[in-house]
Amino acid sequence: VQLQASGGGRVQAGNSLRLSCAASGRTFSSYHMGWFRQAPGKEREFVAGSTRNSGNTFYADSVKGRFTISRDYAKNWVVLQMDSLKPEDTAVYYCAATSKSFTSPGLGLKARESYDYWGQGTQVTVSS
């Protein structure tokens, strides 16, 4: 599967952005999807994930209640709606996909090494 992320930009704190990730191929429903981010000088970290069939969602504590991940199975899109943005949300955001199976998706989807496919990243900058 190929992933193409878009929607990044520069906003002031408190505002919103919507990131989109288009997935190629016909088997979108076979993949768990995730969003990660990487700030300068920091490790890439999990932001949000969605399981492949049921669409169960998981979030990092730092974004819970502010970010929402959703997927459109008809259009092969996964979206990250980001509200109440903070300067510490500034990072390059990546969408990712995996076809692996997990005993505990809530743990598996949060691990960077679980994912086989990555998009190119989109920059999000939040100013104070």
Image (cartoon, helix red, strand yellow):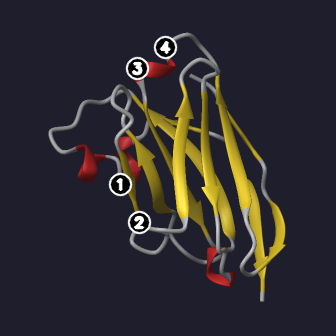
Disc 1: which residue: 110
Distance CA(mark 3)–CA(mark 2): 23 Å
Mark 4–mark 2 CB contact (< 8 Å): no
The residue where tag 2 is placed is 60
Report the side of 94 relative to 113 (left or right).
Answer: right
Q: At label 3, which amino acid type do we have?
A: Ser
- Nearer the N terminus, badge 3 or badge 2? 3
Query: For the point 40% across and 20% down, which residue is it?
Result: 30
Q: Indicate whether 30 appears above or below 121.
A: above
- For label 1, the SS is loop
Taking the view exactly as shown, the residue that stands out farthest to the left is 103
Residue at the spot 69% in from the left edge and 83% down from the top edge? 87
- Which quadrant of the view contains residue 25? top right
Asked if the residue under mark 1 is in contact with the one under mark 2, i.e. CB atoms within 8 Å, the reply is yes
Answer yes or no: do the residues labelled 3 and 4 have beta carbons within 8 Å? Answer: yes
Image: 101 above or below 69: above
Marks 3,2: beta carbons within 8 A: no
**What amino acid type is highlighted by mark number 2?**
Ala
Label 3: which residue?
A: 30
